[in-house]
Amino acid sequence: MKAEIPNRGYRLVELPDILSRNELESGMHTAWAGSTIICLDSIDSTNEQAKRMAEEGAPHGLIVVAEEQTAGRGRRGRNWASPAGKNLYFSLLLRPDFAPSQASMLTLVMALAVRDAMEECYQAGAGIKWPNDIVLNGKKVTGILTEMRLQGETIGHVVIGVGINVKKQTFAEELTHASSLEEELSCEVSRELLFARIMEHFERDYERFCETLDLSGLTEAYNACLVNCKRQVRVLDPAGEFTGLAKGINEKGELLVQTPDGKVHAIYAGEVSVRGIYGYV
Ligand code: BTN
């Protein structure tokens, strides 16, 4: 942003890039995803806030976005560093009427939407590390945390939380494979634009998912950007680690891994994670 100072030439002035509900909504063309957007300066966690609002009756499609999270949460009980002004943190509330066992696939639907939005906006060339990390140049730039609340035997609600590292930043020393979009793409990234395209892709993909209640309509697109595909992976299963060749996902979102004995194992995300044999991917 350039500001003119009379008689003293020009000075570059950094104006804070603050997310606003109007800006988030203005470029977004969806029917229900983001029909209500709650935009907050600071919150413990957008997932927690979406869950609290769900308990109070908030509708399907509500999104909570925050500039900063003071207690951002990652998978497996880890925390998710969430400084202000640098990244995108948002959570989408869904009230599906399908079986709880089908809800775990939604996290893959969101991963594909985020990847495709990055492609549409910036030709990013990002990939998905199974099940739902978005990876650019071998570095993780996005994490997704999906949580479900049961009501008896049916789904009360599902919250899908997305954290995208956007601006250049310093990550904690132990996060050796973390990076940001601007670092990897060497261009300026608009959080509003990316958010709008993600919601459009998600809404479309979600409706596709609902037609079959599995990923059969999305498997091909997902596998085409799966970074693990046709690579040797280490499956970190609490019941015992093993290595094999990743062959893509099936329509349930399970990763198919072929061990040297020729057997193909369908890996369910739950407690299991996957690494490349030489590192993160
Ligand atoms: C991961 O560990 O990879 C998942 C990280 C998910 C972080 C996002 S940021 C928005 C939402 N709110 C949270 O507390 N977590 C998710």
Image (cartoon, helix red, strand yellow):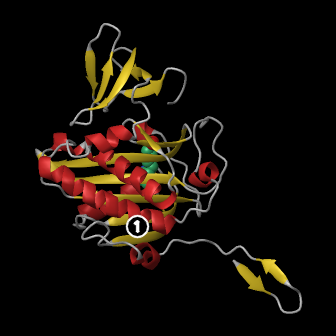
Residue 217, placed above or below residue 273: below
Image quadrant in which you'd find residue 233 = top left
Q: Residue at x 23, y 67 (%)?
A: 59
Q: Residues within 10 Å of mark 1 (few under 14, many from 20)?
A: many
Q: Amino acid at mark 1?
A: Ala
* Residue farthest along the right direction in this orientation: 8
**Residue that mark 1 sits on:** 196
Q: Position of residue 39 (x, y in %)?
A: 43, 71
Image quadrant in which you'd find residue 265 = top left
Question: Where does the N terminus fall, quadrant-wise?
Answer: bottom right
- Secondary structure of the residue carrying tag 1 is helix
- Closer-to-camera residue (210/174): 210
Q: Position of residue 144 (x, y in %)?
A: 40, 47
Q: Is residue 3 left or right of residue 246?
A: right
Residue 182, placed above or below residue 24: above
Q: Residue at x 71, y 73 (%)?
A: 14
Q: Residue at x 28, y 41 (%)?
A: 220
Q: Is mark 1 within 8 Å of ligand 1?
A: no
Is residue 181 shown to the viewer in this render?
yes
Count of numbered marks: 1
Q: Position of residue 52 (x, y in %)?
A: 31, 60
